[in-house]
Amino acid sequence: MAEELDPFKIAQEQLDEAASIMKLDKEAHAILREPKRVLVMSIPVRMGNGHTQVFTGFRVRYNDARGPAKGGIRFHPQESLSTVKALAAWMTWKCSLADIPFGGGKGGVICDTKKMSDKEVEALSRAYVRALGTDMGPEVDVPAPDVYTNPQIMAWMLDEYMNIARKSEFGAITGKPVEVWGSAGRMDSTARGGMYVMREAAKMLKINPRRATIAVQGFGNAGRYAYTLSREIMGSKVVAISDSEGGVYDPDGLDLAKLDEAKKRTGTVQGYKSKKAKKISNEELLELKVDILIPAAIENQVRADNADRINCKLLLELANGPVTPEATKILFEKKILDLPDFLVNSGGVIGSYYEWVQNITGDYWDTDLFYAKLDKKITKSFNATIAMQKEYAAKGEKINPRMAAYIIAVERVAKAMKARGWY
């Protein structure tokens, strides 16, 4: 029987496993299996040709027991409600594990921005906010950039929200340009947080960072920063990287300037040229023998059908949902340290939290302070996850890092719901 790859069913399956291990109250479990609120929106937009196109948009507020919902907005041609619900659930656990005062949310629009003009993208961005209306704001639901959205789109959305609210509330959206009070350091916070986790995991596994070999799947924002920051923070060598078209492998290490040039010239990193470089597929990249594998692209890349061929010591889930539940079990049996997405990529939402705090207080920080706070916060989450895993091991129950992180996160949300009288 083929493995179930529906994103929300995977999210529910992960929660169910954690609930069983931690003996979660049945009423709390029932509440946490489904989102608190789901909006499906019909969004008409006047396009450049003068015709109106109707887009389908989503916003899911999964749980707000610990604070306003927090989560990005994705513009993607294959966007689905199942994906948005799953990501909203994972955002709930991500914010809880990071111990920041947010719940989980997520949004998306089914569209292909590569076929749209800037004016059309702006019109869609503003129309999405108008469709949400007062269902967003700094104390309700705080969006941020995600797949195929960026700081400029956030600025347009913020402007539209302020026009509706009739007041200046810069904390209504994060991931903004610094010109409208975005935060210094926010742009690379997702990957930087992941590299801080990688540093701590490498210490635990006794991996020498300057001799470590790394393969990165993905050359978008997270993947590209993973390349630069792994060298900056760890001094490691990235030997393989890929984009949607495929990848390139060079045992001597890849050069960023050449990767950028190849991408610009040919539209793919496979245009990279060096004496030892060879083209590889995304599947081949995942199965390379390297010290550290970083999936930084899309979900469901490591599955039951290929997990047994993964050949690394540390797998760092920088993407959302790159490893399926069945694959997680296989990697655990192979003694590969698979660190879950909602720990590894939580630097993005931690950075958004810091931006939100600065917007609300009017006290703005420099990059060094931002990075220092991010390092301390995400390192604490890593240590808590490993400690929980050891706590269960001491009781004779072996659990993987994902379940350890889930137990911490779910317990915090459940306690907040209990205190508020939800069950």
Image (cartoon, rainbow, N blue to C red):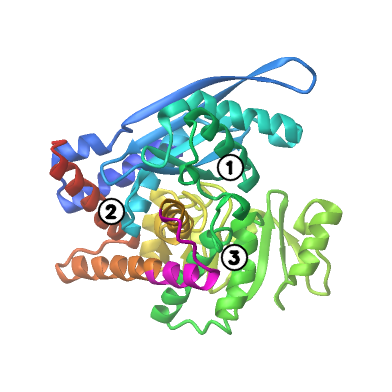
**Is residue 313 among what the camera can see?**
no
- Checking the image for residue 154, the label placed there is 1
**Among the two numbered marks 3 and 1 on one chain, the one whose residue lies closer to the N terminus:** 1
Report crowding for label 1: few under 14, some 14 to 19, many 20 or more residues within 10 A (C-alpha). many
Report, in whole angstroms, how far the alpha carbon at label 3 lies from the one at label 1.
23 Å
The three-letter amino acid code for the residue at tag 3 is Ala
Task: Say which residue appears at 63% left-offset and 28% top-offset.
Answer: 124
- Checking the image for residue 226, the label placed there is 3
Image quadrant in which the N terminus is located? top left
Residue lying farthest right?
A: 265
User: Is 289 situated above or below 347?
Assistant: below
**Among the two numbered marks 1 and 2 on one chain, the one whose residue lies closer to the N terminus:** 1
Q: What is the span of residues highlighted in magenta in the rendered image?
A: 361-376
Report, in whole angstroms, how far the alpha carbon at label 3 lies from the one at label 2.
25 Å
The three-letter amino acid code for the residue at tag 2 is Ala
Report crowding for label 3: few under 14, some 14 to 19, many 20 or more residues within 10 A (C-alpha). many
